Amino acid sequence: MIFAEDGIVANLIAFIVGVELGQLLALAGILILTGYWRRLSSFAKHAGLANIALAIAGAALTGYQVVGYFNS
């Protein structure tokens, strides 16, 4: 995609709108998948495991970022 050099504001707005539309599409897909997942009988067990995995991943990412901050 080629952007016009004199239309930086229009290009920036188009980029932001594109990013937001992409986020809305991703959210719609996630909502559809989780809606289907909630109907399954194994939802409670898997949801608990998924929450634990996300918490561990979040803590690991936080630790990684903190270590990188202090080592830079």
Image (cartoon, rainbow, N blue to C red):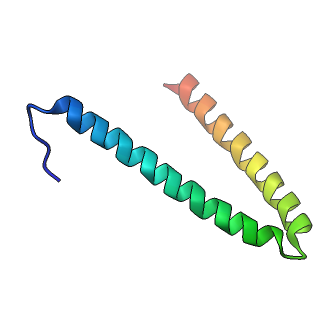
Within the image, what quadrant is residue 28 found in? Answer: bottom right
- At a point 72% along the width and 64% down the height, the residue shown is 34
Residue farthest toward the bottom in the current orientation of the protein: 41
The reply, left or right, for residue 16 in relation to residue 65 is left
Q: Is residue 41 or residue 14 the one in the foreground?
A: 14
- At a point 77% along the width and 70% down the height, the residue shown is 37
Image spot of residue 24 (x, y percent): 52, 52
Image spot of residue 42 (x, y percent): 89, 74
The reply, left or right, for residue 3 in relation to residue 26 is left
- The answer to whether 21 is drawn above or below residue 64 in the figure is below
- The answer to whether 39 is drawn above or below residue 62 in the figure is below
Q: How many marks?
A: 0
Image spot of residue 25 (x, y percent): 50, 58
Q: Is residue 48 or residue 72 the one in the foreground?
A: 48
Image spot of residue 48 (x, y percent): 88, 58
